[in-house]
Image (cartoon, rainbow, N blue to C red):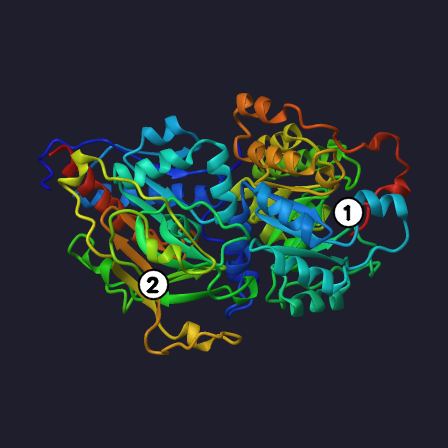
Amino acid sequence: MGSNEQAVDVTVGVLALQGAFNEHVQLLRQAAQILGKKDIAERKWTFKEVRNEAELNSCDALIIPGGESTAISLVAQRSNLLEPLRDFVKVLRKPTWGTCAGLILLAESANRTKKGGQELIGGLDVRVNRNHFGRQIESFEANLDLPFLQEADGKAFDTSQLPFRAIFIRAPVVEKLLPNVAGVQEGEAKVEDTVIAPSRVMDESVSKKIELAQVEIMATLPGRTAALKNTDTIVDPEAGDIIAVRQANVFGTSFHPELTGDPRIHVWWLEQVVKAVDERIR
Amino acid sequence: MATELPTHTTNGERNGRTGEANFTVKTGLARMLKGGVIMDVVNAEQARIAEEAGAVAVMALERVPADIRAQGGVARMSDPKMIKEIMAAVTIPVMAKARIGHFVECQILEAIGVDYIDESEVLTPADHAHHVEKHSYSVPFVCGCRNLGEALRRISEGAAMIRTKGEAGTGDVVEAVRHMRTVNAEISRASGMSDPELRILAKDIQAPYELLKETAKLGRLPVVNFAAGGVATPADAALMMQLGCDGVFVGSGIFKSGNASKRAKAIVQAVTHYNDPKVLAEVSEDLGEAMVGLNVSSMDAKDKMQGRGW
């Protein structure tokens, strides 16, 4: 996109039912400032908290923050937001990013949920394992190399030199990549103690422009699960846990960039949002 | 209404120990609980009701404050077996209470693997002068306060989350309001002060100067701050949120009421939609009997729990 093009205003919502939504709003503001200086995405940004359908409908893109996924899911249901959220993510396929609890809600399949399961929004063809690393005393910080960040603005910061300090709090991981199928993840429905999201058909006007394709692994964390005590799964210590994924409009991270004060991922994501918004009106 | 808590906790670098159990991770869980309701439960069955209602965490304890008040005697840490049953029953974080100053109860709770420890005035204090030194634990702590000095002393000892003390087990929100308003007023006063004035204030309220200065600059406590002690209705919960709290603890208010599940769900909705009176009106309807209250203004000073802690 060139800077001489007609720039479109962009509204980004942060789901504010529960959790660390304000932290995301703060980092979005920081990221927008940086983008403004870079002169590649001069937009009038609006960042807003989303608690009802009208607020959601006014958004071009959405962040689902960290919090307790069971609580967010139940409150969404009782606030009549669950179906509008599925429309936003899976029918209209607008850019959506989930961190931690948000990643769980955006997965098509999840295990270790509460008794009786929980409602998922879906959108990412993955199975997540909740509280993968254990309880709070197992929560940790780790330096991550995030290769996709190097692409930001061409002028890259090398995250192998300047790693991203990531915070994992009772964090989930992506346990399995699932094939992209028409309809629900039937194979997953048969797996014991696993819940799946209902299927939604993509809006026709969108399906011409967005191809779902396969899930892309954006980042892994080497060696952590292998070091866990009390784990009954056999792990390849080299393989690493999948902690960031993307599929078409949906991006998910199992860690919390919103707790770091480091806006690099928010900058990168807003650039993806700009691309998607421009693509839509073209 | 609530002033923003900056995304990066500077307090951690100064006060936290390095390594994996650092202050950022401890305060991080508290941030994840924001906008949510933490409910007192005494068994696994109640914990499940709380989880289904949308609680962000449960507080495991042997007796809810209203019963501790009625039955008297020494209130201690709960039986680890009961806490473990609750941990097995739900997937949300489980907190548990230890007596003020009782660091061995804290060691035991950490060994069980609870997600947060509440060093609580609701239990009978175990030390007449000291609170637990909380930095060395990997499990994070929440502590109660009535005013700014008390809050900052607890943070300086390592608390990663603060709550108002209120007056637990009464169903009377007046003390929680008093404590929140007191903290807000003191911060607002501190925010207008010069450094030399802050030094005098730090001495007066017995708070570390650096923490006071940071708080004055932020215009709010430097950690997550919940309401607690007397919240009994959705309106009480929203009141505390509008006063600037980050979330709400409900103790006796739920399981001492007529319809626990319905009231719990209503309070959860009220904390999310605290600024939307229409939603608040809706969820306040037909909740059945609220807990029988105790009027704090007619209580003797010796019957109040809030005076415990130093």
Direction from residue A211 to residue B239 in the image, left or right: right
Q: Amino acid at mark 1?
A: Val
The disc at residue B64 is 1
Describe residue B85's horizontal placement relative to residue A5 as left or right.
Answer: right
Q: Nearer the viewer, mark 1 or mark 2?
A: 2
The residue located at (41%, 37%) in the rendering is A82
Q: In this picture, is B60 found above or below A161?
A: above
Residue A121: x percent and y percent? 38, 44
Give whichever of A146, A136 is nearer the camera: A136
Depth order, front residue of B132/A132: A132
Disc 2 marks a residue whose amino acid type is Lys
Q: Residue at x 49, y 74 (%)?
A: A231
Residue B293 found in image quarter: top right
Q: Secondary structure at mark 1?
A: loop
Q: Chain of mark 2?
A: A
Q: Residue at x 55, y 30 (%)?
A: B274
Q: CA distance from mark 1 to mark 2?
A: 42 Å
Looking at the image, residue A99 sits to the left or right of residue A180; the answer is right
Mark seen at residue A176? 2
Pinpoint residue A220: horizontal percent, then vertical percent. Answer: 32, 66
Camera-side residue: A263 or B36?
A: B36
Above or below — where is A185 with respect to A53?
below
Mark 2 secondary-structure assignment: strand
Quarter-wise, where is residue B279 in the image? top right
Residue A156: x %, y % from top left: 20, 59
Give percent across and percent down for residue A191. 41, 60
The chain that hosts pointer 1 is B
The quadrant of the picture occupied by the N terminus of chain A is top left
Q: Is residue A249 above or below residue A217?
A: above
